[in-house]
Image: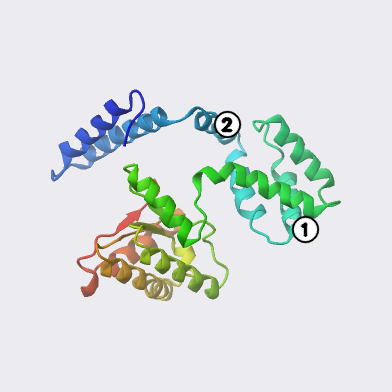
Amino acid sequence: MKFQSGGDHRAQNARDLIESVRGRPLSQDDLKTKASELATLLLDLARDLQTPPEHRHSTQLLRLMDEPQGLAFGQALTDRVARPRSARKRVQAAQRLLAARGIPQSLPVFDRLSLMLLRSAGHIAPGLAAAGILRRIRQEIDPYLIAASPAQVGERLMQLQQGGLRVNVNRLGEEVLSEADAREHCAAYLALLAQPEVSTVSVKISAICSHINVLSWNETLALLKGALRPLYHAAAQATPPKLVYLDMESYRDLELNIALFQSLLSEPDLLGLTAGVVLQA
């Protein structure tokens, strides 16, 4: 990979830091210090690599996140508003969001005016309003997403890998409402693992099981193990073996995620599998 000005130096420092601790036992304090140093180097490197349009976009996003309701507004806009297939329901979801959260003042003037019009008159032409909402959301997220078709995923991953990147594929829209949805997601993960260009995937427990209840611990754990086990087996049987990350979403599921991860990888036929677990701080 070719780095922009300043990037080569930071990238080499990050590599040197990783090599300095490789294979060494570290105390908890040393581990925290080194992890913080590496995170700082990687964040600085990411800033060095930003193009001017990416810098403008990240600055605008930072202003939105700095608003008290900014994060909640952004999450609801891309999840609750974009999800309904009915134009009328999409407009209603947007109007409920605007009534509850208001219009973030950090948004560009055109976006604020559009949301004001949607709030007051979106019900008059819901088809037109819903199409406008989706188009604007897609403009914001398209640079960061790959269309889900196998051909497009494979082509894009090959381009990224040729540039020196290793890619962790993370499917969006993962929260499920029924076991039929969960089975569909599991099948989609298996299809991803079958693609030669895919080396790593992230899986959330909310995508593979619709009945997660920490109060019904044993039953929920058994359901999750039954859903995740085929994905681990598919990763283990690939040549070369692939990596599956168990990606945590909310703190209330912390112990459930760890128990699932440890118990499955303790099974005899999975003892040799390398897997990952992501636990948000």
Query: How many marks can you see?
Result: 2
**151 and 58: which one is in front?**
151
Q: Is residue 51 visible?
A: yes
Rounded to the nearest whole Å, what is the CA distance between mark 2 and mark 1? 29 Å
Q: For the point 48% across and 64% down, which residue is it?
A: 207
Dot 1 surroundings within 10 Å: few (below 14), some, or many (20 or more)? Answer: some
- Which label sits on residue 4? none
Q: Is residue 215 visible?
A: no
Q: Earlier in the sequence, mark 2 or mark 1?
A: 2
Q: Is residue 267 above or below residue 197?
A: below
Q: Position of residue 31 (x, y in %)?
A: 23, 40
Residue kind at label 2, given as amino acid type:
Gln
Looking at the rendered image, the quarter that the C terminus falls into is top left
Residue under label 1, please give it. Answer: 88
Furthest residue in direction left, as rendered? 24
Q: For the point 50% across and 45% down, which residue is it?
A: 144
Residue kind at label 1, given as amino acid type:
Arg
Residue under label 2, please give it. Answer: 60
Q: For the point 61% across and 43% down, which residue is it?
A: 139
Furthest residue in direction top, as rendered? 5
Instruction: Please tell me in which quadrant of the rendered image residue 70 appears.
Output: top right
The residue tagged with tag 2: helix, strand or loop?
Answer: helix
**51 and 271: which one is in front?**
51
The residue tagged with tag 1: helix, strand or loop?
Answer: helix
**91 and 31: which one is in front?**
91
